[in-house]
Amino acid sequence: MSVLIFCDGSREWYRKVLVKPDELYCSPRAPDNAPHTMSRPTGEYDLGAYVQSLPAPWREPELLVLCDDTGGNSIPRNLAAIRCPKILVVGDTHHICAPGKGPIWRPIAHALAEPYDLVLGEFNRHHLHFFREAGINAGWLPCFTLSPFEHPVQQLKKHDVTFVGQTGRHPYRHHVLEQLAAMGIAIGRGSAPRQETAQLHADSRINLNISLNGDLNLRHFEVLAAGGFLLTERLSSESGLPLLLEDRKHLAAFDNVQQLAEMIRYYLAHPPLAAELAAAGHAEYMRFHRPDIKVQQTLDTLHGKTPDTLDLRHDRRTALPADNLESLRTRVALYEFLQELHRTNLRLEVVFLPGTERQATDAIDLPRLNVTVTQGNPAGAALLFDARLDTRVTWVVPAELPRRHWNVAVLPTALLADAGFQQCLQTRRFDAFVLSDFNPQRDTANVKAVEQHFRLRPISSSPAAFALPAATG
């Protein structure tokens, strides 16, 4: 099988073989060095013409695997000219990579515009229901690009608690590490090449992992591959982590910093328990997550043989009625807005007013976002019950709104005229609000009047969102 691999990064960013030993790796960062690598264009380019310019046998590939360019710097077109199965691997949809381009909608739009046979999500299973709703053949393949350095579980350890990773754009990660330091818990911190990082994982009694934004990241698997004990934050069930690895069997999960501190002290005092979890986690990695297994899972999914664990139907939101594309795009933009707030805040209280229950089902997968849903719309409430999410939200009656405070309110534009909502604006029950269905042609004048009357500050245009003025003395 002649395989073409298209990725944005340098070849050394990935493991030596992604699918097949004699694959050709094509990237804007790669040199023309066939049969190993070839440079590919930036900007939009004709993929059919590019493939025809390659040396044999890659002019007639049997499989094309294209990793989504999160920066939007190299966009292939005319995929229909390539007569082989085409797979798009989607990665970082959990934070803004390209300014002004939605991290989720951008790859959805690309997948809709080109004839991919399969779109695979690697880190963000909880976003794939959007792809399915758009009519895209989407599947989940966690840690497809994992480049592990495997170690057997070892008993002798050199370090107590280790964290390897960046903190610059990770407010929650920075907060957790600083709080642990304030509690007197020493954490070995830093960054290192992958091989050295794996050795650190193998040599540490506890390996700490904190996601950027509720994502199932590569560190979950890198630690287990190295035979290390993984202590990680609890993610939503929609992330897929509970389907792959069991808490207190393969790893240990924490819910808050105080609990994390207690767990660190506990496992340092009970090293056999940490070693037992490390051994079970390593065995599960070897059974289900090694690179050769990922390749086979890719091919199986391409041919409709998805393993049950990876079946997206476990996310009940995939069974909800599909919106039209324009409504779906509006919902995705609202979710992207909330997701970015989630990345930059330690905790968010968000209330969804009647008519925005579908948006609540989208937002439920952000683990530090507490979802409150206002009663009063039976049809909307049924969506939460159908997706089995009703027990994961707080329900309030409309009369309760003026008595509580939320960081964000989500509402249909028509509710701007509601007296109860305007009372909440007057008494600053919300820090901000976002409109679920703003239409510039229909709603601009009414929204502008509310904005001026309450001295609101626009903070987003898509979706339309506004911050309330700060209270004065």
Image (spheres, rainbow, N blue to C red):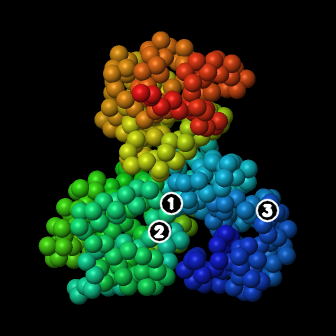
User: What kind of element bears circle 1?
Assistant: loop
Q: Nearer the viewer, mark 2 or mark 3?
A: 2
Check disc 3 and report the residue beneath it: 43
Sequence-earlier tag: 2 or 3: 3
Secondary element at tag 3:
strand
The reply to whether the C-beta atoms of the residues labelled 2 and 1 are less than 8 Å apart is: yes
Where residue 5 appears, x then y in whole percent? Answer: 66, 73
Q: Quadrant of the N terminus?
A: bottom right
Crowd class of label 1 (few under 14; some 14 to 19; many from 20; radius 10 Å): few
Q: Which residue is drawn at 39% across and 49% down?
A: 346
| Front-most of residues 244 and 421 | 421
Q: Name the residue under label 1.
A: 169
Q: In what element is the residue under mark 2?
A: loop
Residue identifier under label 2 = 166
- Bin the neighbour count of mark 3 within 10 Å (Cα to Cα): few under 14, some 14-19, many 20 and up: few
Per the model, the C-alpha gap separating discs 2 and 3 is 29 Å
The three-letter code of the residue at mark 2 reads: Gln
Residues at marks 2 and 1, CA–CA distance in whole angstroms:
8 Å
User: In the visual, does 149 lie left or right of 415?
Assistant: left
- Asked where in the image residue 261 lies, by quadrant, the reply is bottom left
* Residue that appears at 49% across and 55% down: 124
Mark 2 vs 3: CB contact within 8 A: no
Left or right: 63 with respect to 308? Answer: right
On screen, residue 149 above or below 125: below
Q: In this view, does 72 lie to the left or right of 425?
A: right
Residue 275 horizontal/vertical position (percent): 21, 77
Task: Specify the quadrant that holds the C terminus.
Answer: top left
> Relative to 404, is 213 above or below?
below
